[in-house]
């Protein structure tokens, strides 16, 4: 059920699946149990050309399609969801920001290091009092000679303290709403940058999440990304792609739930026969497979149309469908496994723990429905034929 991948993308998928099965998946459970940040996985992905996949070749990227990157995210989520989210943020929300909005000098200076895995990138938009309402952020960027002074606190930052560079959004003085929000590149080791204690999360234990604290941090003019006041639009554009990445993560975890459930159902015997013979189990497997197929089609189609005007609606649709499907079927996978599904040895309880956040980060399911409704209500009747 490949979703009609072209030959080039299929080659990428085959390559990443080999890497996932041989190296990344076998150590995933250990990393989850110990909370180990999978730096070695990121290094391996860089060595094999999977970083900066959509960045132009002229600047050190691979120059591949967004669909190719999406199947990499999906495969990583199948084997190690924590690695998948770190990879997705690095590529979709950080590296993509540079090649879409950076100057020629910024692209030449930053993309090669991001592609080589020398620098891991993160994305710092969310604040404690401005979660879904990004236009209400309060972090300040005060202009001074040669640059800006950033002050504020960012919450729920993936790879906090581990990533070397952060795309930070802050507003200029005397501005409100989306006006004045500006994007900056901030180094982890810059004076005034610190991080809170890693948050103890339900899942994705190998992906560090923490608060980022900015205390009068100097950022040079050359580290501002885009023009002043363009930050809000930069964030929304990047989140369109990021939501496709979250949908791909959900597809990968749903594929893992289906494969583990199918294998268990064929091996586990009750009443003298494999439980796969029972209609109740068969229906659960059938529903998993059907929703996986639909989620992949939506995700791959959104990835193919990444740069089209209506991508915001399509990305939201893919994310809300895929994320809710994986949570629903992670529960079903536990049910198929019975009591064994509730213990860690069989791996399906972890799928549920890791999957739940796909309904929350980069836009909750409720916000996704608002985005979809807005696209419908502000579009034309003719556009509905494209839904």
Image (cartoon, rainbow, N blue to C red):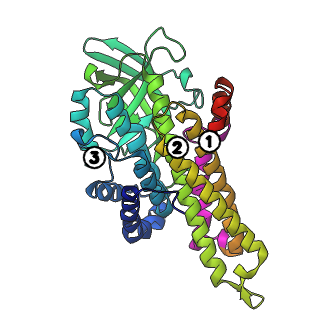
Q: Which of the marked residues, 3 or 1, is nearer the chain's N terminus?
A: 3
Label of residue 151 in the image: none
Q: Is residue 138 left or right of residue 265?
A: left
Instruction: Indicate the position of residue 59 as horizontal and vertical percent values.
Output: 23, 38
Q: Residues within 10 Å of mark 3 (few under 14, many from 20)?
A: many
Q: Is residue 364 magenta?
A: yes
Q: Which residue is mark 3?
A: 115
Q: Which residues are magenta?
A: 341-367
Q: Quadrant of residue 345?
A: bottom right
Residues under numbered marks 1 and 2 in contact, where contact means CB atoms less than 8 Å apart: yes
Whether residue 197 appears in this view of the structure is no
Q: Mark 3: which secondary structure? A: helix
Q: Which residue is mark 1?
A: 317
Which residue: 73% across, 88% down? 273
Q: Mark 2: which secondary structure? A: helix
Q: Which residue is mark 2?
A: 302
Task: Please identify the residue farthest to the bottom as the structure is shown.
Answer: 272
Distance (Cα) linking label 1 and label 2: 9 Å
């Amino acid at each position: 059920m490949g979703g009609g991948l072209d030959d080039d993308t299929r080659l990428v998928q085959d390559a990443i699946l080999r890497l996932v099965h041989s190296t990344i998946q076998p150590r995933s459970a250990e990393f989850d149990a110990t909370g180990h940040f999978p730096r070695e996985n990121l290094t391996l992905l860089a060595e094999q050309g999977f970083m900066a996949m959509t960045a132009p070749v002229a600047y050190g990227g691979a120059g591949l399609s967004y669909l190719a990157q999406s199947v990499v995210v999906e495969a990583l989520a199948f084997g190690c969801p924590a690695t998948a989210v770190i990879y997705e943020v690095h590529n979709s929300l950080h590296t993509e920001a540079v090649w879409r909005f950076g100057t020629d000098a910024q692209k030449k200076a930053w993309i090669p290091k991001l592609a080589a895995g020398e620098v891991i990138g993160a994305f710092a938009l969310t604040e404690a009092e401005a979660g879904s309402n990004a236009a209400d952020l309060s972090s300040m960027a005060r202009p001074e000679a040669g640059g800006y002074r950033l002050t504020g606190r960012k919450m729920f930052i993936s790879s906090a303290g581990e990533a070397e560079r952060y795309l930070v959004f802050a507003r200029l003085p005397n501005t409100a709403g989306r006006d004045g929000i500006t994007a900056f590149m901030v180094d982890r080791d810059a004076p005034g940058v610190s991080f809170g204690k890693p948050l103890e999360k339900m899942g994705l234990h190998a992906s560090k999440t923490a608060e980022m604290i900015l205390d009068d941090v100097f950022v040079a003019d050359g580290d501002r990304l885009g023009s002043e006041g363009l930050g809000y639009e930069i964030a929304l554009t990047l989140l369109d792609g990021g939501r496709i990445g979250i949908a791909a993560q959900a597809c990968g975890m749903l594929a893992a739930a289906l494969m583990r459930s199918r294998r268990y159902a064929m091996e586990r015997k009750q009443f003298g026969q494999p439980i796969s013979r029972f209609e109740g189990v068969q229906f659960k497997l059938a529903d998993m497979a059907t929703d996986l197929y639909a989620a992949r089609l939506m995700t791959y189609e959104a990835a193919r149309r990444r740069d089209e005007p209506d991508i915001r609606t399509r990305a939201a649709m893919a994310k809300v469908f895929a994320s809710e499907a994986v949570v629903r079927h992670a529960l079903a996978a536990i049910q198929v496994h019975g009591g064994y599904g509730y213990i860690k040895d069989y791996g399906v309880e972890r799928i549920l723990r890791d999957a739940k956040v796909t309904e929350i980060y980069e836009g909750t399911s409720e916000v996704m429905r608002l985005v979809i409704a807005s696209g419908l209500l502000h579009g034309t009747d003719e556009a509905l034929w494209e839904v």
